[in-house]
Image (cartoon, rainbow, N blue to C red):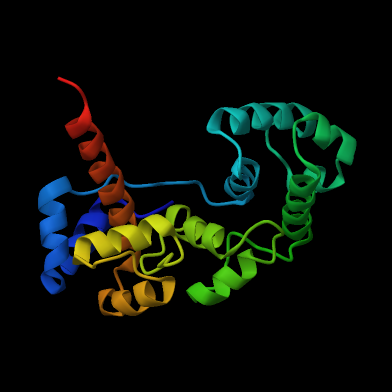
Amino acid sequence: MGLSAEHLKRSLDALARIEPAFVAGLARHGYPEPRLRARGHVTLLRTIIGQQVSVASADAIWTRLAEVVGAEIDPAVLAATPDELLRGAGLSRQKISYAKSLGELVASGSLDLSHLPDDDEAAIAALTRIKGIGRWSAEIYLLFAEGRGDVWPAGDLAVQEEVGQLLGLPERPSEKSVRALAEAWRPHRGAAAVFTWHHYTQRLNAGKAAKAPV
């Protein structure tokens, strides 16, 4: 599972000691809630299904898929399921390719999600062997399902935006700049990422409340 509330608090307190911007951010919006996902192929398959569709649509597809391949979503069964049945469940041709790539890699033992490499970059490389799983999806999996405390999804636009907001920068920094800025935050960059998403959401909600008619 992902970073616990205790881990997040401990890491953010450590960040506050080295970066005053976190002191101010925590004072404004408090500590974030944990973002927890189960480890394993089901979480990755949900990620694939959820790409570029609404939550409601993804849930409907998932329900139909479970009817076709079974509630356990066995990787070997998924890999062997005829394309037409997967299309009937609502998967596009591209997502069928992605789902079968995941099923085949896991069923064959080529990808062991219970024993990913300890090195984060090596784990990202292993996960991105799955069609449809790019670096960002791999990083999110490692954060939310494995609780890796120093994974830093610098390519995420909300992370970039909130790093700029927290540090008072005149514009949203680039991915390269965000990576450089966060070097001093090791080994707590995972908690920093979770906090940036929390800060982003809270800031937007505060802005909407301020604009709401009385």
| 192 to the left or right of 72 | left
Whether residue 81 is situated above or below residue 183 in the rendered picture: above
Residue 76 on image: x %, y %: 80, 48
Which quadrant of the structure image shows residue 128?
bottom right
Residue 158 on image: x %, y %: 38, 55
Residue 14 on image: x %, y %: 17, 68
Whether residue 175 is situated above or below residue 8 in the rendered picture: below
Split into 4 quadrants, where in the image is the C terminus? top left
Residue 163 on image: x %, y %: 28, 63
Q: Residue at x 60, y 37 (%)?
A: 53
Q: Nearer the viewer, residue 174 or 188?
A: 174
Number of marks in picture: 0
Q: Nearer the viewer, residue 121 or 91?
A: 91
Please, which residue is most extreme toward the top here? 214
Q: Residue at x 51, y 56 (%)?
A: 141
Q: Residue at x 61, y 29 (%)?
A: 57
Whether residue 42 is situated above or below residue 122 in the rendered picture: above
Q: Nearer the viewer, residue 63 or 107?
A: 63
Q: Residue at x 36, y 63 (%)?
A: 160
| 180 to the left or right of 12 | right
| 23 to the left or right of 108 | left
